[in-house]
């Protein structure tokens, strides 16, 4: 079965293109669901970095889908061959949907290694070259519930020629056809959902062609690749997404790869994207920062002034560097900064996460200053909770016609920080 049980049910589709609903029937037996717009749970080798399974489950309302990427797993092929029971069991994951992508969105891969027949991923031991046959052999060993087809996505650099973009679309379709042949004949992948990848660089016609051709294949959903943060300006990205979405069927999910910043998420949801990779909180944690942007829509801008009360909020102190996704953004505060040394407030007032309920900014600053591992644990708990709460607020705003207010709330932080 190529499409599995997956079914996208909408409670609301807004005029501009935003979709609110639930992706149902996820997993091999179809018992999981995921609200959209939403994000996957980011992991490395099945583990949310810094957290054990026990600690992770301190968090409420975790996404039912865990993302793993082939670059972390490809070098373990022999062990998985020996183990035989799939990656979920191997890594001790139980009650989750395993979603396998080619690359880790938080770790940019070196470019220049794709050929007509192969793509490369980079594990800890170096480069691993994959043909579609090897890619599918790995998928059979991993036995994910959902996975993204092999694709040539090296078209995001500024100097990419139109000819190269066209070639990437051709290659990606050829890879998809090869993957589908194996997928449909494979017992190990029966009931798994295969997502097709839409490429096309920054050329709207190629984006449309890639989407149109991918949509003709029996895929369960679509992955929009090559539109990641730092590569394109927001207006061009929205224009390219619009070109793609015009060609896609309504009833299948659309996952955007490599985009996680809250302002970009809002713009892409308005363009019609359903799902995101959840790697942004991880990037924020790795630079010793805590998410602190606001997304509450309780105050109606028509009746109140909508201005966040300054004493109860965290002060973001990052600059906006849209060109560099590894740099601190204005949605977070840098807890390594000396100003937090004697700040005895929680990371974010009113946050219900374990970190904010039990610890102060000064303590997390101290942990960071002394390189204690607990800093990463506490920051991951807070950042993940904050990010998931933002998606929940976005869904609520879509349901209650408050998206414009939410946008002003989220972007308001950007303005006050500069
Ligand atoms: Zn918190």
Image: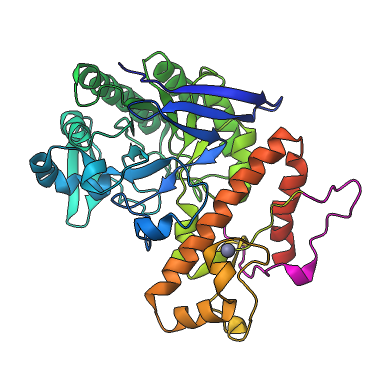
Count of numbered circles on the image = 0
Above or below, 110 against 326 in this view is above
The quarter of the image holding the C terminus is bottom right
The residue lying furthest to the top in this view is 216
The quarter of the image holding the N terminus is top left
Q: Residue at x 53, y 68 (%)?
A: 355
**Secondary structure mainly formed by the magenta segment:** loop
The residue lying furthest to the right in this view is 303
Residue sitting nearer the eye, 258 or 288: 288
- Give the magenta-colored segment's residue range: 298-327
Q: Residue at x 11, y 42 (%)?
A: 83
Residue sitting nearer the eye, 161 or 257: 257
Q: Is residue 369 left or right of residue 342?
A: left
Percent across and percent down for residue 44 are: 32, 53
The quadrant where residue 17 appears:
top right
Q: Residue at x 41, y 29 (%)?
A: 31
The quadrant where residue 136 appears:
top left
**Residue 252 seen in the figure:** yes
Percent across and percent down for residue 57 are: 43, 54
Percent across and percent down for residue 302 are: 90, 45
**Residue 322 seen in the figure:** no
Residue sitting nearer the eye, 56 or 126: 56
Residue 207 inside the magenta-drawn segment: no
Residue sitting nearer the eye, 132 or 281: 281
Which quadrant contains ligand 1?
A: bottom right
Q: Residue at x 30, y 46 (%)?
A: 93
Above or below, 304 against 232 in this view is below
Percent across and percent down for residue 74 are: 20, 45
């Amino acid at each position: 079965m190529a499409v599995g049980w997956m079914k996208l049910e909408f409670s609301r589709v807004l005029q501009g293109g935003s979709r609110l609903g639930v992706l149902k029937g996820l997993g091999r037996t179809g018992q999981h669901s995921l609200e959209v717009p939403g994000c996957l749970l980011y992991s490395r080798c099945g583990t949310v970095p810094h957290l054990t399974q026990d600690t992770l489950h301190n968090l409420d309302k975790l996404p039912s889908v865990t993302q793993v990427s082939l670059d972390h797993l490809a070098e373990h092929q022999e062990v998985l061959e020996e183990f035989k029971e799939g990656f979920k069991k191997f890594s001790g994951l139980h009650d989750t949907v395993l979603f396998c992508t080619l690359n880790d969105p938080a770790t940019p891969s070196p470019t220049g290694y794709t050929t007509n027949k192969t793509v490369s991923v980079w594990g800890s031991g170096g480069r691993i070259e994959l043909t579609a046959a090897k890619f599918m052999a790995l998928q059979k060993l991993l036995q994910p519930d959902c996975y993204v087809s092999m694709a040539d996505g090296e078209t995001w650099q500024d100097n990419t020629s139109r000819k190269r973009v066209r070639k990437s679309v051709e290659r990606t379709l050829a890879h998809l056809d090869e993957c589908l042949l194996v997928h449909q004949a494979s017992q190990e992948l029966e009931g798994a959902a295969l997502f097709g990848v839409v490429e096309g660089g920054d050329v709207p016609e190629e984006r449309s062609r890639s989407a149109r051709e991918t949509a003709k294949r029996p895929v369960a959903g679509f992955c929009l690749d090559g539109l990641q943060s730092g590569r394109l300006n927001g207006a061009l990205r929205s224009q390219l997404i619009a070109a793609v979405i015009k060609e896609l069927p309504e009833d299948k999910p659309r996952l955007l790869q490599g985009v996680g910043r809250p302002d970009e998420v809002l713009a892409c949801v308005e363009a019609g994207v359903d799902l995101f990779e959840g790697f942004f909180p991880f990037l924020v944690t790795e630079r010793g920062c805590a998410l602190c942007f606001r997304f509450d829509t309780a105050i109606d801008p028509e009746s109140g002034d909508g201005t966040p009360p300054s004493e109860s909020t965290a002060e973001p102190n990052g600059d906006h560097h849209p060109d560099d996704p590894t740099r601190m953004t204005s949605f977070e505060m840098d807890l390594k900064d000396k100003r937090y040394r004697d700040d005895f407030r929680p990371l974010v007032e009113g946050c219900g996460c374990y970190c904010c309920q039990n610890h102060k900014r000064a303590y997390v600053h101290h942990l960071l200053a002394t390189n204690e591992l607990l800093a990463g644990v506490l920051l991951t708990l807070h950042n993940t909770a904050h990010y998931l709460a933002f998606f929940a607020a976005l869904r609520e705003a879509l349901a209650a016609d408050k998206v414009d207010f939410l946008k002003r709330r989220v972007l308001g932080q950007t303005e006050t920080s500069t």
